[in-house]
Image (cartoon, rainbow, N blue to C red):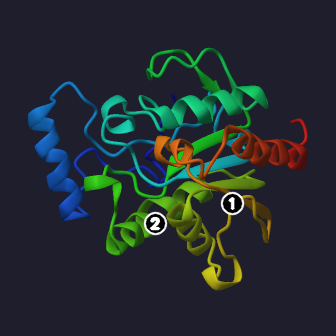
Amino acid sequence: MSISSEDGSEPPRDCPLCPRLHDFIAEWRTREPGWHNAPVPTFAPAEGDEKARLLIVGLAPGLRGANRTGRPFTGDYAGTLLYGTLERFGFARGRFEARPDDGLELVDAAITNAVRCVPPENKPVGSEIRTCRQHFFVPTIERFPNIEAIVSLGTIAHQSTVRALGLAVKDHPFSHGCEHDCGRLRLFASYHCSRYNTNTGRLTEEMFVEVFGRVREFLGEW
């Protein structure tokens, strides 16, 4: 897993910018000292940031998923669907075993979250979304010079991405399967691949796969 903080895109382990999230993580460090319990870094291609043409943006780390393991979408159901889909379209290689040391590598892609720290009840508030966007999400997008496509997972991730790109949300509304041309890149959107969305039928595997199929078609092969 590639981690970089020299460019300012990664929060420090004890990031104090959002007091509510900082205190929530501190509580879980006491309860589960063996967990990651810190801002979750972007998962980038092993070959280097310049190899990423696709950026996938989630909402925030899951409490018992990425907050526990330290890798985006690792340790809960959402990761099973996401990484399986990425492997299917050649954006990942190796075997996903829901552990940060499983050897899985991203190809042509990177994964981050709009909010880097786990929020209570999986619900970041507006000030937290805005703070993380200004301090870390915008630099994350800038960190990857060859990004041509972004997939936003869910409304909050989509809106924060639009704002991070300096665009107006009203001109780039969220809907599952939508596409927006955003200057040098294209923004694709999907419902979040959470167990809740799949259990309720809001998102099916076929719907999710279709979005990434269109991304692969748009990017072509490297």
The secondary structure type at the circle numbered 2 is helix
The secondary structure type at the circle numbered 1 is loop
Based on the displayed image, in which of its 4 quarters is residue 20 positioned? bottom left
Q: Find residue 14 and report its horizontal and vertical position in percent.
A: 22, 48
> Crowdedness of circle 2 by 10 Å Cα count: few (<14), some, many (20+)?
many
- Vertical position of residue 25 compared to residue 160: above or below: above
Left or right, 216 with reference to 137? right
- Vertical position of residue 204 compared to residue 167: above or below: above
User: Which residue is identified by label 1?
Assistant: 176
Based on the displayed image, in which of its 4 quarters is residue 70 positioned? top left
Q: Amino acid at mark 1?
A: His
Q: Look at the image and tell me in which quarter the C terminus lies.
A: top right
Residue at 14% x, 46% y is 26
Count the marks: 2
Q: Is any part of residue 9 visible from this angle?
A: yes
Kindly give the residue lying farthest to the left in the view shown: 30
Q: Amino acid at mark 2?
A: Arg
For marks 2 and 1, give the one nearer the viewer.
Answer: 1
Left or right, 18 with reference to 213? left
User: Which residue is identified by label 2?
Assistant: 133
- Looking at the picture, tell me which residue is in the foreground, 101 or 210: 210
- Vertical position of residue 117 compared to residue 128: above or below: above
Residue at 61% x, 80% y is 169
- Vertical position of residue 87 compared to residue 131: above or below: above
- Looking at the picture, tell me which residue is in the foreground, 8 or 125: 125
Residue at 64% x, 84% y is 170
